[in-house]
Amino acid sequence: MAKKKVIILGAGLTGLSAAWHLQKRSIPYIIFEKERSIGGLCRSKKIDGFTFDCDGHMLHFRHRYVFNLVKSLLGDNLVKHERNAWIHFYDRLIRYPFQANLFGLPSRIARECLTGYLKVHKNKLYEYANFEDWIKFTFGYGIAKHFMIPYNSKFWTLPLKELTCDWLAGFIPIPTREQVVLGAKRDVPKQFGYNASFWYPRSGGINELPKVLACGLKDVRIGCRAKRIDLKKKEISLSSGGKETFDCLISTIPLPEVWHIAPDLPASVAVSFKKLKWNSIFNFNIGLNHCGNHNRHWIYFPDNKLCFFRVGFINNISSSLVPRGKSSMYIEVAYSRERPLDKRKIITNIIRDLKSVNLISCPDEVCLQDINDIEYGYPIYDLFYKHSRDNAVGFLRENGVISCGRYGSWRYMSMEDAIQDGRRAADEVGKLF
Ligand SMILES: Cc1cc2nc3c(=O)[nH]c(=O)nc-3n(C[C@H](O)[C@H](O)[C@H](O)COP(=O)(O)OP(=O)(O)OC[C@H]3O[C@@H](n4cnc5c(N)ncnc54)[C@H](O)[C@@H]3O)c2cc1C
């Protein structure tokens, strides 16, 4: 078989994993990455002794293969943590997940949640038309009203009736009846759910993972943006002015971007690209001039009056990410085309809300600010999602493009899934050689 030319677009975890697995098979490739550094969403920034990730990034493993790979690459620089996550509920903090920790609630609300849960738990015969129905029929009226609906509406930025349940698998912890009842009776510190424990680098931030994956890769070209993909000629035009032809293209760039740079898409396909929806995440990181006074990992905020949905405390996970005697927070705000964000006011609003929930006592505590405005946050699984996504990815596949990764395959993927997807793409390319 004549040598085939493989090009990878994007040096996030998916692109790096694809390259790593191709290299293992001795298949040559070139990666083009538009930014000046590798890592994609798993980049970290070092500023004045603080290290900030591009929003909170904790590792969860379901696949033994990925765990072994990551462990072999990171070695001792990988530490397991038992989750210490909380929910801000009016004047108090209750343990996460809400549905298994009703004990912490005011007694009237706890009763409402438990009665509602027991009612639906008895009659479990329902085809869920949408995410809101799934919530109501899985957790009951009280849990839906007090946490699940407000929190998820804030996060997804759309009415939950417009979302399907196709993304759920494993992402929302579903306790057993016994766990719900026990959690309503007393404080149960034991954690459960897909992220009951998680892994994180001991030092250096989450960027250590793409760094070790990229170490030893032969052809990674940074600062090279693919600005046009000609599917007929099988040719990429680069921001540097050069052109590259390909036999096989592994693309990890977001599908809505592909729509902009691959001209002449048939109208029936273009319409599918156009229908894709997503939320964006405004990630505001702050350095604080004191060492903090708790050991929580993160707190969820369902209250719609507060602008953020979650605040995390990365130095409680890796103390090396802040200078001695200091601490930091990462703050997450969701927005979208459907629910835009006023970016002129958001910092002031975040500081105001951090004060109102006693996470800072005065703005002078903040010694450093950093922003990651993440355009593509979470692909939204609305009623058009499946058809549009399958049509877009299928069309690219028919034209020699393996579109993969969180934004290339347009799926709610974790870092582990991204590594798996890169491996899968490499396996597929391997079959052509
Ligand atoms: C807010 C947030 C929090 C998250 N938290 C977690 C978590 O706690 N745990 C977890 O497991 N997962 C988490 N994830 C998911 C995780 O970040 C992703 O699954 C993973 O990083 C996706 O990797 P990727 O390579 O597919 O995409 P990306 O990381 O987006 O990489 C794509 C790369 O392509 C490059 N690119 C784009 N356009 C072009 C172009 N035209 N030419 C060349 N290059 C281009 C980009 O610069 C980027 O480097 C989170 C995601 C978000 C948004």
Image (tube, rainbow, N blue to C red):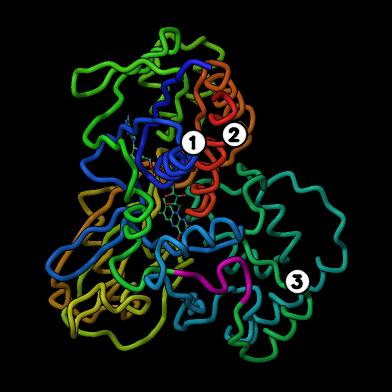
Please state, as top left, top right, bottom left or bottom right, where the C terminus lies in the image. Answer: top right
Q: What SS does tag 3 mark? A: helix
| Image spot of residue 221 (x, y percent) | 26, 34
- Circles 2 and 1 in contact, beta carbons < 8 Å: yes
Q: What SS does tag 1 mark? A: loop
Indicate whether residue 167 is drawn in magenta: no
Q: Residue at x 52, y 62 (%)?
A: 151
3D distance between C-alphas at marks 2 and 3: 30 Å
Query: Which residue occupies the extreme bottom position in the image?
Result: 186
Q: Where 87 falls versus 304 (above or below)? A: below
Residue where numbered disc 1 is placed: 277
Q: Residues within 10 Å of mark 3 (few under 14, many from 20)?
A: many
**Image disc number at residue 117:** 3
Q: Where 150 falls versus 402 (above or below)? A: below
- Circles 2 and 3 in contact, beta carbons < 8 Å: no
Q: Amino acid at mark 1?
A: Lys
In the image, the segment drawn in magenta is 192-199
Is the CB of the residue bearing disc 1 within 8 angstroms of ligand 1? no
Residue where numbered disc 2 is placed: 385
